[in-house]
Amino acid sequence: MVFKKLGAEFLGTFWLVFGGCGSALISAAFPHLGIGFLGVSLAFGLTVLTGVYAVGYISGGHFNPAITFGVWAAGRLPAKDILGYILAQLAGAVLAAAALYLILSGRPGFVAGGFASNGYGALSPAHFSLLSAFVGEVICTFFFLVVILGCTSARAPAGFAGIAIGFALTLINLIMIPVDNASVNPARSTGPALFAGGMYIEQLWLFWVAPIIGAMLAGALARWFEKNSA
C-alpha cells in the first residue's frame, strides 16, 4: 500500500508539472497562438483537478511537499510518511521537467531560459521584490491549504474536493504569475529550476520556505477548528 501511495504522488506531481509548466512553455513557442497567463492558470487548475480525481483516492492527492506538511500539521498524516511523499513528488516534478526539456529541445533554436521557473527581483515576470514574493507565497499557500483541508474534511460534501482544489489553484496562479510565476509548491519549483540553472536555483529556497510556512499555519488552524467545533 505504501508503494501505491508513493506511485500516486509521483504520477500526480508529474502530471501537474508537465501540464502546468508545459502549457506555458509550449504555447510560448507560438506567440500568436499563446494562451496567456489566464490559460496557464487554468492549465494548472485542470491538472490538479484531474490528478486528484485520478489518483487522489490512493494517496490523498498532495502532489506538493507544502500540502504534505500542511496535512501533517492538521493531524491527518503520520510523520513517518512525510519523507516518502516528498521524495516521490520531487521525482515526479524533475522527470516531468526533463520530459518537457526533451520535447522542447526538438525545436530549432530552443533556449531553456527561465524554463517556467519561479523567481523574484530580476527573475520576477514583473520584477516584484523578494518580500513581495515571500508574502504572496505564504498567504496563497495558507489559503490553498485552508481550501484543501476544508473540502476534504469529513463534514464537507463528498465528491467535490477536486473541483474546489482545482479552482483554488487557478485563482492562485492568476494572482501570483506576475509576481513570481506562481509556486505554492516546492516540487513544482524544483523541477524547472534544475534545468534553468543559475539564479533560479539560488532563489529556490524561497519557494520551499514560504509555501511550507503557509501550509503549516493552515494545518495548525484546521486542527484548532476541528478541536473547537467537536
Image: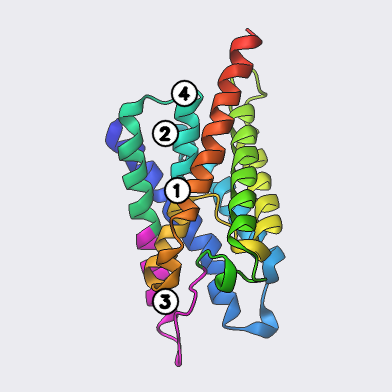
- Is residue 135 something that shows in the picture? yes
Seen at 42% across and 76% down, the residue is: 103
Question: Tag 1: residue type?
Answer: Gly
| Residue 126 spot, x, y in % from top left | 67, 71
Q: Label 4: which residue? A: 76
| Residue 116 spot, x, y in % from top left | 52, 69
> Which region is colored magenta?
94-116
Q: Label 1: which residue? A: 12
Q: Residues within 10 Å of mark 1 (few under 14, many from 20)?
A: many
Question: Tag 4: residue type?
Answer: Arg
Q: Is residue 40 above or below residue 26?
A: above
* Label 3: which secondary element: helix
Q: Label 2: which residue? A: 58
- CA–CA distance in space, label 4 to label 2: 14 Å
CB atoms at circles 4 and 3 under 8 Å apart?
no
Residue 109 colored magenta? yes
Q: Nearer the viewer, residue 148 or 189?
A: 189
Question: Tag 2: residue type?
Answer: Ile
Which numbered disc, 4 or 3, marks the residue closer to the eye? 4
Q: Nearer the viewer, residue 19 or 62?
A: 62
Which numbered disc, 4 or 2, marks the residue closer to the eye? 4
Residue 161 colored magenta? no
Quadrant of the frame with the N terminus = top left
Q: For this view, does 194 lie left or right of residue 114?
A: left
Mark closest to the chain's N terminus, 4 or 3: 4
Seen at 60% across and 15% down, the residue is: 226
Q: Is residue 213 above or below residue 114?
A: above
Q: Label 3: which residue? A: 103
- CA–CA distance in space, label 1 to label 4: 19 Å
